[in-house]
Image (cartoon, rainbow, N blue to C red):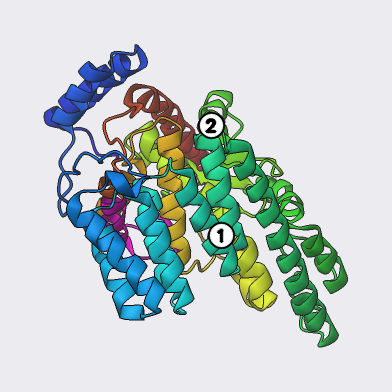
Amino acid sequence: SPQEPTLSPEEITRQLKFIEADRLYLAGQIPQAEKIYREVKEPFSKTSIPQERKPAILDPTQLSPGGKVYWRESEAGIATKLQTRTVVPLQLLVEQYPEFIPGHIRYAQILKQYDRPKEALDILERASSLYPDQPELVKARVTALAGEKKWMEASLAARQFAILNPEDPQAAEFTNLAQENLERYKRHIRAEIRGNVIGNIITGALGYALTGSLLGPFSAVDSTIILLQGERAIGDSVAQEAKKQLNAITDESVLAYVNEIGQKLAKVTGREEFKYEFFVIPEESLNAFALPGGKIFINAGAIAKTNSEAELAGLIGHELSHVVLSHGFQLITQGNLISNVTQYLPLGGTIGQLFALSYSRDMERQADTLGTRLIVASGYAADGLRNLMVTLDKQQKNAPPSWLSSHPGGGERVSNLENLITRSSYNRYAYEGVGRHTEIQARVKKLLQEKKARDEKK
């Protein structure tokens, strides 16, 4: 493999500045830390500097004269049951006065009424990313998601609010909403599994799909039982065998580092029914994959090739998001199980191809969004995942396939993340964790060199 690149004097200076900023940040000297972070971090290429978010307005009497006109016009449109007369003033109202929360809620209700549910959801998604602390807005989004049978997303939106706003008087109500929607989602998935898997068994399509793989020589009936038990059962059934076959690293300092980051992020997801476990496998490529139910496998190369703890947290947060959003589980249950299992299992391929599920672009966008929210809620710099993408993009030229190969849409995703961070006023100038990351990196690089030497002797 190519020689590990050495840092230039400029890169060393930059790294030392990050280490100093992190020290100040952890000592509670936030303004001084932010000043250094701002000095060393490049501005985003395509997005404008985020404007200060205006305080939310809940009462129409507090609107400016122009805003009041739009609000009155929409009321007149509702009274006369005229679509254009209702929709146009509401559209202008939310564009010009995004701080007016009832405007977004009414606009979404009207769009749904006129059979435009996707647009209604888009309005509520944008508004709640601007004002994620507004309970009525988040509640409207949860209701709209549930109305479109997006129960897992509804559950997550409610749980995120409860977790991130524990002091809000309605926090307990949101926890209940999250649970209700999660139960609906589970009922739906169970019905789908029964339809799909039992149908496949009848036609004999599953007779051989799971034989000789990490899952072991299960019969079709055994695999059905596992699927009906749910996500955690799938993860548990595969993880221990995978851990053995992949020779997971046992170094305590490396595992403690990864587990600390992972558990911190997992705590914010709110899906406490999963047992989250994090494994490091001795592979050099920058890669990771997630099993349904909370088992995350991270290549040692992901530690060796990322620039900070925040970047690594971005990678783990993204994979956790696939777990929390049940993306892998959905792919197994929705599609023909055979096609997914063949992607799931290493049939003579490299370990890096393991569990390279074909996530859709929509799934990737959701996991990027939630992954960024997870790292923000855990106290990391908001651009950890965005910076990871940039790092990967630089390393991917003339390199073997990495994480981006199974997670498509690199350039567009960087741009989307920049827009999300800017629009939501997430803080880019928070903890990076460069010093500690560098120490663990040295340990990981040594472990990879030792493995390479052993492999060459074979």
Residue 241: x %, y % from top left: 73, 50
Q: Nearer the viewer, residue 56 or 228?
A: 56
Q: Residue at x 41, y 72 (%)?
A: 111
Q: Amino acid at mark 2?
A: Lys
Q: Nearer the viewer, residue 256 or 3?
A: 256
- For the residue labelled by badge 2, is the local secondary structure a helix, a strand or a loop? helix
Q: Nearer the viewer, residue 92 or 43?
A: 92
Residue 181: x %, y % from top left: 66, 56
For the image, the number of numbered tags is 2
- For the residue labelled by badge 1, is the local secondary structure a helix, a strand or a loop? helix
- Residue 119 located left or right of residue 209: left
Question: Which residue has dot 2 on it?
Answer: 264
Q: Which residues are magenta?
A: 398-420
Residue 143: x %, y % from top left: 56, 59
Q: Residue at x 45, y 47 (%)?
A: 371
Q: Amino acid at mark 1?
A: Thr
Question: Is 400 one of the magenta-colored residues?
Answer: yes
- Residue 351 located left or right of residue 3: right
Q: Is residue 428 above or below residue 20?
A: below
**N-term-proximal mark, 1 vs 2:** 1
Q: Residue at x 21, y 16 (%)?
A: 32
- Residue 30 located left or right of residue 325: left
**Can residue 417 be seen at all in this image of the molecule?**
yes
Q: Residue at x 43, y 26 (%)?
A: 440
Question: Which residue has dot 1 on it?
Answer: 143
